[in-house]
Image (cartoon, grey):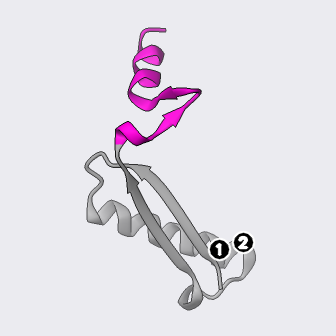
């Protein structure tokens, strides 16, 4: 019984986009690991942008620096 937790920044992700992520992850586990889709759980957590960091920086600062290079 796979459990997959997908974390994304809270940036206007639509319900249709979330449904596509859930379907895609479920399909991937079924194809690659022969997992039963009916027993596959996918949870999407949206994290506030100010609570997310990458490369030692808050994501907004990381993005700002990347856009200037």
> Which of the 4 image quarters holds residue 30?
bottom right
Q: Is residue 36 left or right of residue 43?
A: right
Q: Residue furthest front?
A: 51
Question: Residue under circle 1?
Answer: 29
Report if residue 9 lies within the magenta region. Answer: no
Badge 1 marks a residue whose secondary structure is helix
Identified at 36% across, 64% down, the residue is 18
- Tag shown at residue 32: 2
**Is residue 56 covered in magenta?**
yes
| Stretch of the chain drawn in magenta | 49-69
Q: Secondary structure at mark 2?
A: helix
CB under 8 Å between callouts 2 and 1? yes
Task: Tell me if 32 is positioned left or right of 64 in this view.
Answer: right
Which of these two is toward me, 60 or 31? 60
Residue 42 in the image: above or below residue 48: below
Q: Is residue 55 above or below residue 46?
A: above
Q: Position of residue 25 (x, y in %)?
A: 55, 68
How much space separates mark 2 and mark 1, taking CA atoms? Answer: 5 Å
Residue drawn at (57%, 85%) of the image: 37
| Residue 49 found in image quarter | top left
Percent from the top left, x then y, of residue 38?
A: 54, 91
- The residue positioned 65% from the left and 86% from the top of the image is 1
Q: Which residue is at 37% across, 69% downward?
A: 19
Q: Residues within 10 Å of mark 1 (few under 14, many from 20)?
A: some
């Amino acid at each position: 019984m796979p459990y997959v937790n997908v974390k994304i920044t809270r940036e206007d992700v639509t319900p249709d986009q979330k449904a596509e992520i859930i379907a895609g992850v479920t399909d991937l586990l079924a194809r690659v690991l022969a997992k039963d889709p009916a027993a596959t759980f996918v949870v999407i957590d949206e994290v506030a942008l100010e609570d997310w960091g990458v490369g030692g920086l808050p994501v907004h600062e990381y993005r700002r620096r990347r856009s200037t290079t």
